[in-house]
Image: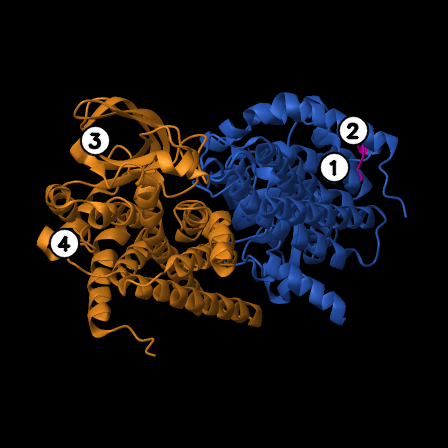
Chain colours: A orange, B blue
């Protein structure tokens, strides 16, 4: 057993950290305050190759593994949680399904453009009445001569309006629930694709979240990802590794909360109550990180990792929420005002317990796996 | 033991409840979004006697009971935490006068507040003196029949809108906390400067201000109690006001839970309302139990304020600590119950979660409450 990062991963982490601290962190307070897409940060990440971490080099990516991906998102999140979720959704659920389920032509067409950042990816599964119960989705894909016509409304779509390519899930056949769902690659420029309401949220203000409306969107048959009726499998597999990314995001927020708490306590007369809280925070963070890296390691080896990914997502995001609250408590009223990172972490962290499968869904998955 | 409210308290509660539904609830989201002090709500409270609740009848008010104050704060906080602070701070800013004021001072200073002609505020914290109140730098020097006040106060709720301000200042820097005295400043005769702090996490409509005093003249007749008695008064006031913050936390949690409970009964997933899932049911049971436990502690503390009980300090700190920690956890869970909808501003629970956090911080952080409780236990 070796719980140290290999040299390659450590080097990669150092490189991402330099970029994140140099080009991403300085924007974090501003994009939050102004609800602005962190264009420069995403461009800097693209130029550094961070939008193609999981994409093999033959398709223009870096060809790195799930652990590198987790580390990448962790480092970005430590600098700016909004930027990290933009890159995370693009990389995992927005691009990886093409890698895993696409045919050669689809890979050659889309992966290089996603890897370079020419196109930003997004994932459109959730609907107003279909959240945790994803198999109940109602968007339709009607077969025509040479393709499909898509109709429906997707909600809570990260990267909405900025994505160039959406992975969209819709009902292509009469089969009930999961069996009737297919996945489609829908370029944002396709006629009939429209951005609906973009939500004002509690946090992650730099990352747009909103509705994607599909009105008679004609998609060629060549844009169907995987077989007809395989869409739900595509979605669930995408979310499995997506959870590794969200775990990384949670670790980054939690690490930032711990680091800022350390800096704060270094400047004031510490009491034992402060020390005990900091000790608990650091211990929780360490346990969460090991859980997340274990899930990523299993995924990299091609071994089953569903259970570990759900445990990591649950534990890492609960940890991020608690540590963000603890850190704000240490900071007191100063931490609750005026662009303070402490209050921002609290607002950002809450989303992580909800998206990519709420933590209630993670518990259902974990229990199912444990009882198997 | 008697857990029932009096008829009078029930009547006051029902009046406030109806008023809140009618006038406050519809404004809550907008107050948060615009981060503006709701002067209109202050007027509604003034016109309906709510600002008079902290005062006994002989000073123009309608109650003066901590139980009634807590009830009022709780009812308002269910809909809008910012608005509940208008009553909470009216009580906080008036307690020093009611606790330490002479009969002449009470008769002179209370009626305009009780009538809602102006609101009160309480200025203790400074940039370098938060939890450690004795380290304050603001000072007052006596010249004949008046004092001249200099210094600055930080994080003063309603400090920019108040007409009456109780300020704590050093009158004898050599004497440490025994050199602190309390003064009542009235804006017309002793004006102070205030700048509002922007971009808060929560209670965004409640102006949190930085106050500056440059040679502000205060009549000696507006000193509360003896010189040097201010620190003891500051603590005595916080003992009385902390149940009110507990009540605010309680109301925030109840407001979020009311909303979330209706939501889970309505929201269908997997062919049934999500309230049919045991995982959700356990969350509901835990939330309701925590709210109930906090409610009892808050009202227990309030009855001790009214009874001037000797162990008030400990119970008041417990009520504030427990209710605010409860509110933070409960509102976080209520956002969770609404899922993605909980996270967006079209729904009220994310605001309630943001509002809950400050209850763990102000009027003595929860770390300070623990220190107070431990000190009382180890005495």
**Label 1 secondary element:** helix
In the picture of the structure, the residue carrying the numbered disc 3 is A188
Q: Which residues are magenta?
A: B59-65
| Residue drawn at 27 percent across, 49 percent down | A92
Instruction: Give the percent coordinates (x, y) of residue B257.
Output: 62, 39
In the picture of the structure, the residue carrying the numbered disc 1 is B71
Give yes or no for contact between labels 4 and 2 (Cβ–Cβ under 8 Å).
Answer: no
Q: Is any part of residue A164 visible from this angle?
A: no
* Crowding near the residue tagged with mark 2, few <14, some 14–19, many ≥20 C-alpha atoms within 10 Å: some
Mark nearer the viewer, 4 or 2: 4
Q: Chain of mark 4?
A: A
- Is B62 colored magenta in this rendering? yes
| Residue drawn at 55 percent across, 29 percent down | B28
Mark closer to the chain start, 2 or 1? 2
Q: Are marks 1 and 4 on the same chain?
A: no
Q: Chain of mark 2?
A: B
**Label 4 secondary element:** loop
Q: CA distance from mark 2 to mark 1?
A: 9 Å
Give yes or no for contact between labels 1 and 3 (Cβ–Cβ under 8 Å).
Answer: no
Left or right position of A92 against B324: left
Numbered label attached to residue A61: 4
In the picture of the structure, the residue carrying the numbered disc 2 is B12
Placement of the C terminus of chain B among the 4 image quadrants: bottom right
Q: Are marks 1 and 3 on the same chain?
A: no
Numbered label attached to residue A108: none
Mark closer to the chain start, 4 or 3? 4
Instruction: Give the percent coordinates (x, y) of residue B134.
Output: 61, 61
Camera-nearest residue between B30 and A362:
A362
Left or right position of B316 against A287: right
Prevailing secondary structure of the magenta residues: loop
Mark nearer the viewer, 3 or 2: 3
Give yes or no for contact between labels 2 and 1 (Cβ–Cβ under 8 Å).
Answer: yes
């Amino acid at each position: 057993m070796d719980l140290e990062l290999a040299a390659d991963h450590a080097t990669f982490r150092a490189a991402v950290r330099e970029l994140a601290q140099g080009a991403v962190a300085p924007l974090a307070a501003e994009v939050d305050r102004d609800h602005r897409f962190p264009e420069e940060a995403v461009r800097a990440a693209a130029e550094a190759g961070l939008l193609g971490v999981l994409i093999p080099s033959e398709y223009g990516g870096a060809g790195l593994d799930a652990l590198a991906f987790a580390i990448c998102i962790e480092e970005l999140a430590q600098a700016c949680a909004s930027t990290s979720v933009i890159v995370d959704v693009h990389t995992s659920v927005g691009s990886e399904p093409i890698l895993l389920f696409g045919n050669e032509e689809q890979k050659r067409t889309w992966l290089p453009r996603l890897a370079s950042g020419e196109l930003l990816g997004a994932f459109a599964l959730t609907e107003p009445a279909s959240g945790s119960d994803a198999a109940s989705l109602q968007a339709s894909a009607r077969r025509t001569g040479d393709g499909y016509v898509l109709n429906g409304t997707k909600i809570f779509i990260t990267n909405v309006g900025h994505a160039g390519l959406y992975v969209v899930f819709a009902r292509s056949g009469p089969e009930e629930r999961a069996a009737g769902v297919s996945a489609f690659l829908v370029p944002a420029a396709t006629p009939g694709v429209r951005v609906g309401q973009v939500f004002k949220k509690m946090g992650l203000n730099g990352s747009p979240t909103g509705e994607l409306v599909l009105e008679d969107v004609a998609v060629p048959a060549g844009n169907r990802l995987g077989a007809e009726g395989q869409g739900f499998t595509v979605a669930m597999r995408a979310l499995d590794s997506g959870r590794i990314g969200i775990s990384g995001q949670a670790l980054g927020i939690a690490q930032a909360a711990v680091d800022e708490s350390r800096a704060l306590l270094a400047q004031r007369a510490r009491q034992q109550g402060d020390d005990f809280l900091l000790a608990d925070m650091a211990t929780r963070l360490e346990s969460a990180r090991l859980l997340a890296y274990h899930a990523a390691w299993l995924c990299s080896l091609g071994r089953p990792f569903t259970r570990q990914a759900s445990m990591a997502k649950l534990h890492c995001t609960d940890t991020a929420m608690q540590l963000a609250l603890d850190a704000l408590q240490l900071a007191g009223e100063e931490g609750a005002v005026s662009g303070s990172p402490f209050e921002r972490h609290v607002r950002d962290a809450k989303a992580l317990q909800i998206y990519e499968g709420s933590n209630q869904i993670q518990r259902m998955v974990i229990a199912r796996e444990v009882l198997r | 033991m008697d857990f029932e409210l009096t008829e009078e308290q029930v009547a006051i509660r029902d009046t406030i409840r109806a008023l809140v539904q009618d006038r406050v609830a519809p404004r809550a989201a907008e107050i948060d979004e615009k981060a503006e002090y709701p002067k209109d709500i202050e007027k509604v409270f003034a016109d309906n006697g709510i600002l008079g609740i902290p005062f006994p009848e002989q000073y123009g008010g309608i109650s003066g009971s901590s139980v009634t104050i807590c009830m009022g704060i709780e009812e308002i906080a269910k809909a809008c935490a910012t608005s509940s602070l208008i009553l909470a701070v009216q009580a906080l800013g008036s307690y020093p006068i009611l606790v330490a004021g002479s009969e002449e001072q009470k008769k002179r200073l209370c009626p305009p507040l009780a009538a809602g002609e102006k609101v009160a505020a309480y200025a203790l914290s400074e940039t370098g003196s938060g939890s450690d109140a004795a380290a304050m730098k603001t000072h007052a020097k006596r010249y004949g029949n008046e004092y001249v006040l200099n210094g600055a106060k930080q994080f003063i709720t309603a400090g920019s809108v108040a007409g009456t301000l109780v300020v704590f200042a050093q009158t004898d820097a050599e004497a440490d906390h025994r050199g602190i005295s309390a003064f009542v400043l009235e804006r017309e005769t002793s004006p102070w400067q205030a700048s509002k702090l922007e971009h808060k996490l929560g209670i965004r409509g409640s102006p949190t201000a930085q106050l500056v005093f440059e040679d502000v003249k205060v009549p000696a007749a507006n000193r509360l109690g003896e010189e040097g008695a201010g620190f003891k008064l500051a603590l005595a006031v916080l003992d009385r006001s902390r149940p009110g913050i507990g009540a605010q936390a309680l109301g925030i949690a109840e407001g979020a839970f009311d909303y979330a409970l209706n939501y889970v009964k309505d929201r269908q997933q997997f062919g049934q309302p999500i309230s049919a899932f045991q995982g959700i049911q356990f969350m509901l049971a835990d939330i309701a139990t925590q709210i109930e436990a906090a409610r009892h502690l808050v009202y227990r503390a309030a009855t001790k304020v009214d009874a001037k009980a000797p162990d008030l300090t400990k119970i008041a700190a417990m009520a504030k600590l427990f209710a605010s920690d409860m509110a933070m956890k409960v509102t976080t869970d209520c956002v969770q119950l609404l899922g993605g909808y909980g996270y967006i501003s079209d729904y009220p629970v994310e605001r309630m979660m943001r509002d809950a956090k400050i209850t763990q911080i102000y009027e003595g952080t929860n770390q300070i409450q623990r220190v107070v409780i431990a000190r009382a236990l180890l005495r």
